[in-house]
């Protein structure tokens, strides 16, 4: 089978699975739909996951998406996994995390370091509809993994687990637990180990469930805790070797930090669709939405933000397969930036709804749920500080060895539907000195022929690329000045600003690469420059880079036209334009 034929067959299989899931979940705005917004909001009021939807996802075998193919599941690509969960996150982020993503976050460590027996038992549990939970760190310590409250000791050949943690997603319902424990009081990367525990095998008098932890967002997710008291643990429960916990966690983050934000952005798809639905049905300030310039700009800009976020999510998840040595930085930057951009997008859209923003039921009630869920979903298993501490120390290395000297990557990093080489978890956790994404930006700035294809937007696109390239030069000089500083000295506002600038440049480079490598493909909209021009304009404004007036008014209009077309046709608002079951309002 040729590569092209194989790629088409793989994409066809993925599209079919997504279509089956969308069809089964049905129109979310249908009040009679047991899996729709009304049912989701009612379950949220009870602080529960929608039970009917849980049963449906189990019947559809969705958990197979988290299990590697060699173990009987369907997981083989990070970008496909994120795309498969988007129909669930569009309905309910609580369901997305509680039913699926939470188990994947835990199971990644087993796929990376577990023995054949550990992997098989975990796969069997998930394929049977069970769940796995992971305990990384403690809430009271600012989400810092290395201040974990669990401790594991060895005495006379027996392992003993002690400690408590208040917030673990699915702790109460999980059939297995991945627990990271302190095993050495001395500081350093060998201070922690990980164990895989089967809940049914633990002595009941040594394990205690703690009360549920109430949250404003993701109220349907069960977030409770566990306490262990001198609990015996079999040595074969170790994941990897003694002292491998930090390495295992960080290598797992290189996958999960990019996959989870890629799933989460589907919730903002729903927020945008809700705001657009409201604007079409009721107008804005008593006028039809298309006659209100501010509303048009807000809708088109929000759509462009979603596309640029998806561009960064796409390249980050595909880099796991193609450039694993760069994935640690890309995943952390994605986990850092997407919540910021998406939260700002939701805020912009909230202005369109006016007082209807506060509705907790009805056709627009789902918007306020997305507003509540987004911040806590984005926090997930590593917050802003953790991502900053991953990226900032790498900036002087990349500035010295990669930026403005590395060649641009091949098209595979940016192609939405192209196949990928198998995931090699053994290569995760090894930091390299390359930065293929910013090499893509530098290639555009060096006079890429792609800019000539921008037609009427060629001049403005050239200006935007030159402006972003100048920002890269300034960032390089600033990052080089960090060389030689201790990690503790890097935690300051100046370093945080560099992290912000770097992440935005990655997003800009991702959007440029996606646009360049869709030309000649099946998606005419992505192949046109309108969306990338609007997206880059918004990134430049975020960077504080002055640009004259509105240099591309036509781009905004055509991006809005595409948004309205997808709304009418029921297409998703991400890069893929996948068919959804959402029926537009009359």
Image (cartoon, rainbow, N blue to C red):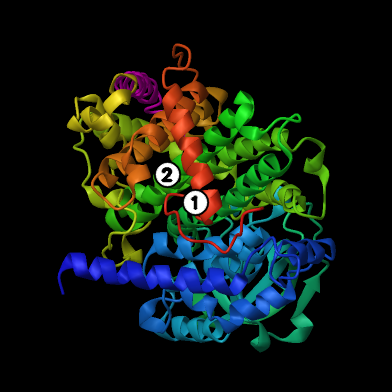
Judged by its main secondary structure, the magenta piece is helix
Mark 2 Cα shell of 10 Å, populated few (<14), some (14-19), many (≥20): many
> With 20 as the anchor, is 399 left or right in this view?
left
Q: What label sits on residue 188 in the rendered view?
A: 1
Seen at 52% across and 40% down, the residue is: 303
Decide: marks 1, 2 in contact (CB < 8 A)? no
In the figure, is residue 264 to the left or right of 75? right
Location of residue 372 in the rendering, given as x and y in whole percent from the top left corner = 73, 48
Residue tagged 2: 312
**389 vs 274, nearest the viewer:** 274
At 31% from the left and 60% from the top, the residue drawn is 427
478 inside magenta stretch: yes
Outermost top residue: 548
Which structural element holds mark 2?
helix
Frontmost of labels 1 and 2 is 2
Q: Is residue 528 left or right of residue 192?
A: left
Question: Relative to 457, is 358 above or below?
Answer: below
Q: Is residue 183 visible?
A: no
Magenta stretch: includes residue 152? no
Is 565 above or below relative to 32? above
* Magenta stretch in the rendered image: 461-486
Look at the image and tell me in which quarter the N terminus lies.
bottom left
Count of marks overlaid on the render: 2
In 3D space, how far apart are the residues under numbered discs 1 and 2 (Cα atoms)?
A: 32 Å
**Residue 424 falls in which quadrant of the image?**
bottom left
Residue at 59% across, 84% down = 59
Q: Write down the quadrant of residue 197 in the picture.
A: bottom right
| Left or right, residue 42 beside residue 579 | right
Q: Earlier in the sequence, mark 1 or mark 2?
A: 1
Q: Residue 348, located in which quarter of the rendered image?
A: top right
């Amino acid at each position: 089978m040729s590569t092209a034929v194989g790629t088409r067959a793989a994409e066809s299989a993925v599209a079919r699975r997504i279509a089956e899931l969308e069809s089964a979940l049905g129109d979310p705005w249908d009040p009679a739909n047991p899996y729709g917004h009304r049912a989701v909001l009612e379950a949220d009021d009870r602080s529960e996951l929608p039970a009917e939807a849980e049963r449906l996802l189990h019947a559809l075998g969705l958990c197979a998406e988290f299990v590697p193919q060699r173990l009987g599941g369907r997981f083989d690509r990070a970008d496909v996994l994120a795309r498969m969960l988007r129909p669930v996150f569009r309905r309910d982020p609580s369901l997305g995390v509680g039913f699926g993503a939470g188990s994947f976050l835990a199971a990644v460590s087993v796929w990376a370091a577990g023995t054949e027996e550990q992997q098989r038992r975990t796969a069997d549990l998930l394929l049977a509809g069970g769940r796995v939970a992971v305990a990384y760190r403690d809430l009271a310590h600012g989400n810092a993994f290395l201040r974990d409250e669990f401790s594991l000791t060895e005495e006379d050949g027996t392992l003993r687990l002690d400690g408590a943690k208040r917030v673990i997603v699915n702790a109460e319902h999980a059939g297995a637990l991945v627990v990271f424990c302190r095993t050495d009081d001395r500081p350093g990367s060998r201070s922690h180990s990980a164990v895989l525990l089967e809940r049914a095998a633990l002595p009941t008098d040594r394990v205690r469930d703690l009360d549920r932890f109430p949250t404003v967002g993701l109220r349907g997710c069960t977030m409770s805790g566990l306490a262990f008291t001198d609990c015996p643990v079999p040595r074969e429960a170790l994941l990897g070797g003694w002292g491998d916990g930090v390495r295992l966690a960080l290598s797992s983050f290189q996958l999960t930090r990019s996959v989870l934000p890629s799933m989460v952005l589907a919730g903002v798809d729903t927020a945008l669709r809700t705001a657009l639905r409201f604007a079409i049905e009721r107008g804005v300030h008593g006028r039809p939405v298309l006659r209100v310039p501010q509303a048009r700009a807000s809708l088109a800009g929000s759509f462009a933000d979603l596309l640029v976020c998806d561009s960064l999510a796409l390249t980050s998840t595909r880099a796991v397969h193609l450039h694993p040595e760069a994935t640690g930085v890309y995943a952390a930057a994605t986990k850092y930036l997407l919540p910021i951009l998406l939260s700002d997008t939701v805020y912009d859209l909230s202005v369109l709804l006016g007082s209807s923003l506060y509705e907790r039921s009805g056709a627009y009630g789902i918007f306020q749920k997305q507003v509540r869920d987004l911040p806590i979903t984005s926090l997930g298993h590593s917050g802003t500080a953790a991502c900053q501490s991953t990226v900032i120390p790498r900036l002087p290395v990349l500035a010295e060895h990669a930026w403005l000297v590395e060649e641009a990557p091949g098209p595979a990093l940016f192609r939405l539907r192209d196949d990928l080489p198998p995931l090699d978890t053994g290569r995760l956790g090894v930091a390299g000195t390359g930065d293929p994404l910013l090499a893509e930006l530098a290639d555009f700035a060096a006079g890429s022929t792609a800019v000539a294809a921008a037609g009427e937007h060629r001049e403005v696109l050239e200006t935007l690329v030159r402006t972003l390239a100048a920002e890269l030069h300034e960032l390089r000089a600033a990052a080089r000045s960090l060389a030689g500083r201790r990690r503790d000295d890097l935690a300051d506002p100046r370093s945080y600003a560099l992290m912000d600038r770097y992440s935005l440049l990655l997003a800009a480079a991702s959007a440029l690469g996606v646009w360049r490598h869709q030309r000649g493909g099946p998606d005419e909209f992505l192949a046109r420059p309108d969306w990338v021009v609007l997206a880059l304009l918004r990134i430049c404004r975020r960077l504080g880079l002055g640009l004259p007036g509105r240099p591309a008014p036509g781009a905004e209009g055509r991006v809005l036209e595409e948004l309205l077309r997808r709304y009418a046709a029921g297409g998703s608002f991400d890069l893929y334009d996948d068919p959804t079951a959402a029926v537009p309002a009359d």
